[in-house]
Amino acid sequence: MSNTDKPSRNRQFLLAHRPVGEPGPDTWELAEASLHEPADGQVLIRHDYISVDPAMRGWMNAGKSYVPPVEIGAVMRAYAGGEVVASKHPDFSEGDAVTGVLGVQEYSISDGKGLRKVDLSLAEMPIYLSVLGMTGMTAYFGLFDVGEYREGDVVVVSGAAGAVGMIVGQIAKLKGSQVVGIAGGPEKCRYVTEELGFDACIDYKAEDVAQRLGVLCPKGVDLYFDNVGGDILEAVLSRIALHARVVICGAISQYNATKPRGPANYLQLLVQRATMRGMVVFDHAARYHEAAQAMSGWLGEGKLKHREDIVEGLEQFPDALMRLFRGENTGKLLLRVDH
């Protein structure tokens, strides 16, 4: 990196307060920090895209979870993709395209741990943050490992127009299943059926989910992939089949609730001898290559569609995050960082 293009300042979003309910303007501080050269064993990365994910809301909370909470005053945790602009690390060179947990900021210094090189001649960076990234890994392992997918399963997916849900449903269709999506609004439901190829989509804003499932899945739901929780989880539990599997991937309807609620009819799991199991994609890190190979194959064959919803500008992060909870995105939500 030449002296003429060497950055000296770094804009970053810091967690200023732990929110109660929805994150508000006082949750964040948009700060500017000085940027230093990487030390031995480090790389300096320019962020081009930042992933905006529902899990971010949980990372703001104090208390025990699958990862430590973001500390007050720290850069907000986020997946990002960009370019190595300076390197003193033996495994990375200037110009390498990389992804990793790099934070909501313009630049980052990394010791290389958890950093993944990607080939931009094969796919653009947004795809490595969506279907070929954590989104695709979550869909793959959630369906096959946690959900124990079986041939002939009747599969229901909530958040079907979202980043993970749209991939889960398409994979299940590739395997020959009947797939029913649940999404909010006629436009999203049309996208799920007409573009993604789901057999049907229930508009939870206008339809009775349990009643529609009774019509669409008369023998019950074998595998439910849940991204939303709350009332929709309860509705699907009322229609599960014998030995059904319920994958708890997320619960976006509950993340901002001051008094989160679970399903009152959880005894359906007993009646139907079903299982409900949570999943965290990090548990499958040793096998990411397996999922990436499968996804790449389906993409190359034109069998897997994806959609990235890109918001321009780092400063739009607070509103972009709330778009998730307002249900305004279709597909994988990303920030494009302007430099």
Image (cartoon, rainbow, N blue to C red):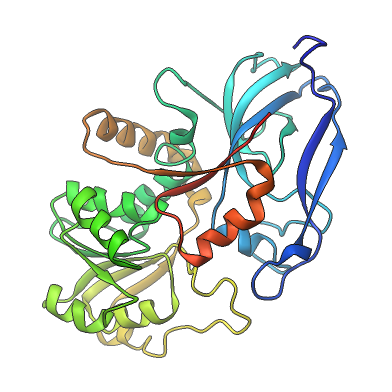
Q: Is residue 112 left or right of residue 241?
A: right
Is residue 116 depicted above or below 261 in this figure?
Answer: above
Q: Residue 91 location, x and y as percent?
A: 64, 17
Is residue 226 depicted above or below 136 in this figure?
Answer: below
Question: Toward which corner of the image does residue 66 lie, by quadrant?
Answer: bottom right
Question: Toward which corner of the image does residue 46 lie, by quadrant?
Answer: top right
Q: Can residue 66 be seen here?
A: no
Q: How many marks?
A: 0
Quadrant holding the N terminus: top right
Front position in the image: 40 or 37:
37
Tell me the residue at 35%/68% (across/down).
184
Q: Is residue 310 left or right of residue 103?
A: left
Q: Is residue 160 left or right of residue 125?
A: left
Tell me the residue at 62%/23% (across/down).
83
Tell me the residue at 13%/78% (across/down).
215
Q: Residue 276 location, x and y as percent?
A: 38, 72
Q: Residue 193 location, x and y as percent?
A: 20, 56
Question: Toward which corner of the image does residue 255 lie, by quadrant?
Answer: bottom right
Q: Can residue 283 be seen here?
A: yes
Tell me the residue at 32%/75% (across/down).
204
Q: Residue 47 location, x and y as percent?
A: 65, 32
Quadrant holding the C terminus: top right
Is residue 239 depicted above or below 38 in this figure?
Answer: below
Is residue 317 depicted above or below 113 in this figure?
Answer: below
